[in-house]
Image (cartoon, coloured by chain):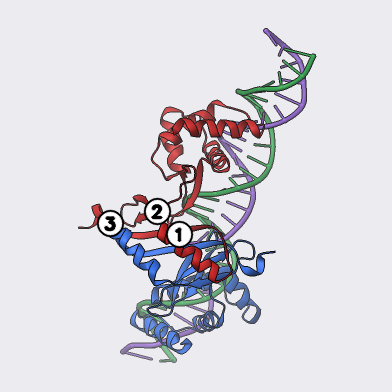
Chain colours: A blue, B red, C purple, D green
Amino acid sequence: MKRAKTKIFHDFIAERGLKSTRQRDIILEAFLVSDRHLSIEELYLHLRAAHPTIGYVTVYRTLKLFAESGIAREFQFGDGQTRYEHVAEGEHHDHLVCVRCGAISEFSNAAMEAIQDEIAAAQGFIIQHHKMELYGLCSACQR
Amino acid sequence: MKRAKTKIFHDFIAERGLKSTRQRDIILEAFLVSDRHLSIEELYLHLRAAHPTIGYVTVYRTLKLFAESGIAREFQFGDGQTRYEHVAEGEHHDHLVCVRCGAISEFSNAAMEAIQDEIAAAQGFIIQHHKMELYGLCSACQR
DNA sequence: CTTTATAGTGAAATTCAATTTCAAAATGAG
DNA sequence: CTCATTTTGAAATTGAATTTCACTATAAAG
């Protein structure tokens, strides 16, 4: 899985005539090993411990490249930071976001997708993608 | 409807010990008559034609007040601007967003809400609110 | 109808993350 | 190794939201 994404990204780099650099490899490794849903800032700070020479901008640009290559996806939850999550090929899921602790968990539901298609069809709308997030309290934060 | 919201807002102003001002009335009137889903910028520019002395900041603060009073709701679609939409009491709906022309239409679906509740319950999550947007091409933009 | 304490206004300044710029450094094709 | 091209990282810029502050308007009390 991790290996597969590494290959996808390296292939992407090659196809586009881009260069393989030490920084990109380090950032890729850190991203793949990380929790899902990291923001640029979070990944940058995390990396800085072991690699103080890698700049915020490089992390920013590299995450963009991950998104373009298809191994990551950009997300906006309500906190003003752009987050990047891992993408498993073919898989789609939505999110549960805890408004207290910020934890993000995932779910997917075929019935829901079916209803979305019906709704869109009824209005002659062609869906390209969607966003579905449930905000509330995770079980740990209920007290 | 429009009258009802005017009253709700005026009551809110009174309860909070805030003051009724010419600017607030003008902005309220313009908001209620407007298309739904206006951004601060859009409403500000629209107002400026007839009321050049009203500042951006006042529109910004007044829209926030509308949201607090319950007659409006803040929304983030993908375009970097915060938008405000009219709220009908008790009513909830979701959005279809055209990625080409930016048109926003609405729908609501009871079955979908039921599924959301099931999903949350299964994870011991308590939903406070949700966000559901379908992005794609509206019928007018398919060609 | 004043007075006066309080809230509101608007311009300018600030914040905050994202994005761009640019000179120096690294990569890799030949 | 050489050189054209891409990358990098710091600094600058952008764009929207938000805060500050001096001045003005509101409305409650007298």
Q: Which mark sits nearer the N-terminus, 2 or 1? A: 2
Q: Is B139 on the left-hand or right-hand side of D14? A: left
Separation (CA) of disc 2 from disc 1: 9 Å
The quarter of the image holding the C terminus of chain B is bottom left
Q: Mark 2: which amino acid?
A: Ser
Q: Secondary structure at mark 3?
A: helix
- Residue B46 vertical position relative to residue B128 in the rendered view, above or below: above
Pointers 2 and 1 in contact (C-beta within 8 Å) = yes
Mark 1 sits on what residue? B113
For this rendering, which residue is in front, C3 or B88? B88
Cβ–Cβ below 8 Å for labels 3 and 2? no
| Cα–Cα gap, marks 3 and 1 | 18 Å
Quarter of the image where one finds residue B10:
top right
Chain at tag 3: A
Q: Residue at x 37, y 67 (%)?
A: A113
Q: Which mark is residue B108?
A: 2
Please name the amino acid that badge 1 sits on.
Answer: Glu
**Marked residue chain, label 2:** B
Residue identifier under label 3? A122
Up/down of B58 relative to A102, above or below: above
